[in-house]
Image (tube, rainbow, N blue to C red):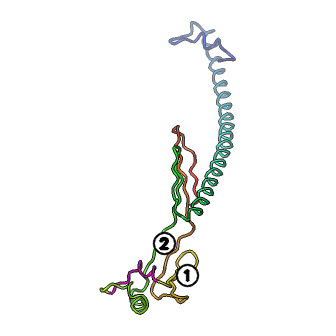
Amino acid sequence: MADHPELIEWVDEGWTPRGELEAERALRGLDLLAARFQEIHARAVEYRADIDAWEKMETAKLQGAGTRLVLGLQSWARDLRIASKHQTKRWTFPTGTIESKAGLKKTQVDDEKALLAWCEANVPDAVKVEKKVLVSVLGKAEGVEIEPGVGVRRLMLHGEPVPGVSVVVPGPERFSVEVKLASQRALPAASDG
């Protein structure tokens, strides 16, 4: 103990008092040790609170910087993807990868009979001999378009809804950034999706 180094020096392993004076001195020493333990614990609690506050503040700065870096990379990749007419979707570097993934549209048939009757009359190539609608052919037929917007939309032919079918149009494409770190420390992940 810094305040009472003599207590540590004369209390070796196997120590026993050699009389009442040393016993009384040992009892006072125990009291001093207990007080010192409480003082050290109180300081440690303060230090931990300070360290926790410092850690929270510093990691918040890093998370903010990481988020800004990811958003900047996503914006850069989005601009390049648009400039390439959506041909470039992945950029690989020695330190990581930037990739854009467009949401996949999914066509779902809501009323097969109505859609089949309509396709037989309007897009016969979209109908198999077994009378099943080929939605992949229907979607590519001349004049067939998806109703504008995001979410569940109708298929349209020359402005008129195609009965029995809807299309789920995804939201905007999403970008992800993956970093290959030289150390094993992990940075917080950031994504726009």
| Residue ID for mark 2 | 105
Looking at the image, the residue that sits furthest to the top is: 18
Crowd tier of the residue under label 2, counting other residues whose Cα lies within 10 Å: few below 14, some 14–19, many 20 or above: some
Kind of element beneath mark 1: loop
Query: What number is the disc on residue 147?
Result: 1
Work out which quarter of the rendered image holds the N terminus and state it.
top right
In the image, farthest residue toward the left = 130
- Name the residue: 52% across, 80% down: 146
Instruction: Provide the secondary structure element on which disc 2 rests.
Output: loop
User: Relative to 158, is 58 on the left or the right?
Assistant: right
Which of pointers 1 and 2 lies earlier in the amino acid sequence? 2
Q: Amino acid at mark 2?
A: Lys
**What amino acid is at disc 1?**
Glu
**Residue 140, percent from left and from top:** 45, 79
Residue at point 51% right, 44% down? 94
- Name the one closer to the observer, 15 or 44: 44
Image location (x, y in percent) of residue 159: 55, 88
Q: Quadrant of the C terminus?
A: bottom right
Q: Do callouts 1 and 2 mark residues in contact (Cβ within 8 Å)?
A: no
Residue 39 within the segment the image draws in magenta: no
Q: Residue furthest front?
A: 84
Mark 1–mark 2 Cα distance, whole angstroms, equals 13 Å
Q: Is residue 50 above or below residue 88?
A: above
Percent coordinates x, y for residue 66 in the rendering: 62, 48
Q: Position of residue 167 (x, y in %)?
A: 49, 78
User: Left of 147 or right of it: where is 50?
Assistant: right
* Count of numbered circles on the image: 2
Q: Is residue 159 above or below residue 18?
A: below
Q: Which residues are magenta?
A: 131-141
Q: Is residue 138 magenta?
A: yes
